[in-house]
Image (tube, helix red, strand yellow):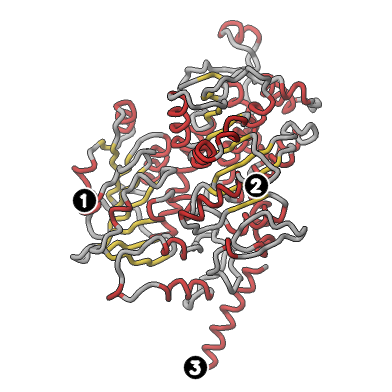
Amino acid sequence: MTEAIKDGKLEVKQASKEVKESENVAEKYSAMTVKNTDMNVEELSAAFTAVPTHKSVKKQIQFANQEDKQEFSKFPTKAGRRSLSRSISQSSTDSYSSAASYTDSSDDETSPREKNQVNSKGNSDFCVKNIKQTEFGRREIEIAEQDMSALMALRKRAQGEKPLAGAKIVGCTHITAQTAVLVETLVALGAQCRWTACNIYSTQNEVAAALAESGVAVFAWKGESEDDFWWCIDRCVNTEGWQANMILDDGGDLTHWVYKKYPNVFKKAQGIVEESVTGVHRLYQLSKAGKLCVPAMNVNDSVTKQKFDNLYCCRESILDGLKRTTDVMFGGKQVVVCGYGEVGKGCCMALKALGAIVCITEIDPICALQACMDGFRVVKLNEVIRQMDMVITCTGNKNVVTREHLDRMKNGCIVCNMGHSNTEIDVASLRTPELTWERVRSQVDHVIWPDGKRVILLAEGRLLNLSCSTVPSFVLSITATTQALALIELYNAPEGRYKQDVYLLPKKMDEYVASLHLPNFDAHLTELSDEQAKYMGLNKNGPFKPNYYRY
């Protein structure tokens, strides 16, 4: 018996040891894919005119580490389990995915805000979970770089000219290895960056540590509270001797905070780049009200974001997130997907391929017709909610799944969100005395009704794939490259080119971003002859589609 215990301890110890181990811009860049011509700042700033528009840890039978044991021990007994507050999400700072943060700190429960940490250069202008995780984070970033060759190519080609020299970019995105590649690209192009997270669950702690070690002011960790979230944003914006002149946002929270709390910073900014439907919606609201006093780029509706990140990324990551959290088998399951935009399409394709019986809810007759033609039933949620095994939201709206829907769900129904914001599922309505919350895994809660019915809620209604799993580096390279080019354009655009409005990237830029990624597939484009180009009324080098074209 003693030997077995010793062997078990040795196994855990060994596992722990493993853990520690303008079209002008586009044309210029495009030309460089064929010829190794030199680039200069003048050509870079002669920008295009945009179109205005409204090794994972081996699993043990025992607890894999002390932190998991401590987290499990914190939950109340069955008799005492009642509606749990956000303290549950605060304590749940680990993930069972390969994206989980490595933990080797004995004071893991201490809030990063209470720690005094410095990197190897003596710099303390950051707040992360554990700066000692730097080495692991650097490995994650290096792995991501291998599958983000287009963004790396842009870094190599443009870093000599430093097109972002003088740019002070404050960013609020998911802090993952892929984001780190983007941030380090912006730094290589001359920018100073301060960064925070747009989601309290999606931060990879080791990646945040690696960025802090490299000199980027990062304020983020996995499992932040709501108060931590806004504190981190404020620390990024409000710092002595540094004022942001560019904003890169995902969701609009950073833009909203700067607009409300630091209006002078907002007015003096040279541009905003926004990548989510929620954030873009907020920008259009400001523009319509005449309160948008800075030009903004709508990356979310660029072709390279909509048709690749939203579609293909979600097609692969939806299954990953559900499998890691629930171990569910999809064959024969009844699933309703709320929303049939690009995210919904990607989710439905993946679920259908594994044998799930999928139906759709939609408000848009065009998207609804697409769903019908793709072989999916279009229903109202109230009509089918009792039969569903899974409910997945991806609309960008609020209160798509209400308490009434949740009350009518069958026992064991899985509820999750693939939209950016946590507003789609009315989670707040579940925090009542008559319901019991039981944390069964990281990011997995059983909400138990008085009659014993359980609903399985994932990531407390926040974005499933980035909260509970990982996403493909290659497809994020497409979005990141688009974001980098949008920042370059807004920062270098001459005064007067952009008014206080929301703009789309031009088709030529979308085509350039796509062309950078084709070599990964050994793809060879057909070239138009002069006669063919004249017949079609096109430039041989693009753009090949008008701005109104729908792919």
- Identify the amino acid type marked 3: Met
Q: Residues within 10 Å of mark 3 (few under 14, many from 20)?
A: few
- Identify the amino acid type marked 2: Thr
Q: Earlier in the sequence, mark 3 or mark 1?
A: 3
Secondary structure beneath label 2: loop
Q: Nearer the viewer, mark 2 or mark 3?
A: 2
Can residue 7 be seen by looking at this rendering? yes
Residue 78: x percent and y percent? Answer: 30, 74
Picture quadrant of residue 100: bottom right
Q: Residues within 10 Å of mark 1 (few under 14, many from 20)?
A: some
In the figure, 357 relative to 115: above or below? above
Residue 259: x percent and y percent? Answer: 52, 36
Secondary structure beneath label 3: loop
Horizontal side of residue 493 vs 253, given as left or right: right
- Picture residue at 53% right of the left edge, 23% below the top: 503
Q: Earlier in the sequence, mark 2 or mark 3?
A: 3
- Picture residue at 48% right of the left edge, 27% below the top: 291
Q: Residues within 10 Å of mark 2 (few under 14, many from 20)?
A: few
Picture quadrant of residue 440: bottom left
Q: From the image, tell me which residue sits under label 1.
A: 387
Q: From the image, tell me which residue sits under label 3.
A: 1
